[in-house]
Amino acid sequence: MHIAIGSDAKTELTDNVIQYLTCQGHQVTLFGALQTPASDRWVELAQETAAFVSTGKADRGILFCWSGTGVSTAANRIKGARAALCWNTEIARLARKWNDSNILCMALVDTQLDLAKAMIEVFLNTEFDEEGFNEAYKLDE
């Protein structure tokens, strides 16, 4: 799977997530401080990452900022981006299953590596339940 990853800071967590994904055989494209150390502008990197995903250049995206809120808000301004701020595996699963989210957002402030890996695995491996979504929102009527 091709995954776009952006962050406003290069941290031990982001480095380990990149290593984890590449060791799993995923192709990664980096944005923000992960690509250019001086690039810490969270709005721009979130929107660049979201545009990369929403145009089909990547299958999914992962974004980080201190709280995760800023990048999720900025990413969702891009047409076709469905960024979800997640804090546990169940929220990550539901973001994919019920909302067809294509960008996982996480906080740098308190997300531990084991939790990040678990959320990523769930996010990458959960399919969107289009039938259930349409039934819940009566979109076919």
Image: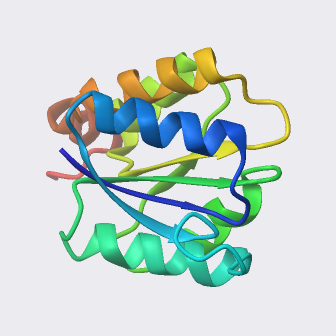
How many numbered dots are placed on residues in this image? Answer: 0
Question: Vertical placement of 36 versus 34: above or below?
Answer: below
Tell me if 42 is positioned left or right of 88 in this view.
Answer: right
Which residue: 61% across, 18% down? 115
Which residue: 64% across, 69% down? 33
Q: Quadrant of residue 109?
A: top right
Residue 53 shows in the view: yes
Question: Vertical placement of 114 versus 12: above or below?
Answer: above
Residue 64 image point, x, y percent? 65, 53
Residue 4 image point, x, y percent? 37, 59
Residue 29 image point, x, y percent? 34, 63
Which residue: 57% across, 63% down? 34
Q: How is the image coloured?
A: rainbow
Tell me the quarter of the image containing the N terminus.
top left
Q: Give the camera-side residue of 96 and 14.
A: 14
Residue 120 image point, x, y percent? 44, 30
Residue 136 shows in the view: no
Which residue: 63% across, 23% down? 113
Q: Give the camera-side residue of 55 and 109.
A: 109
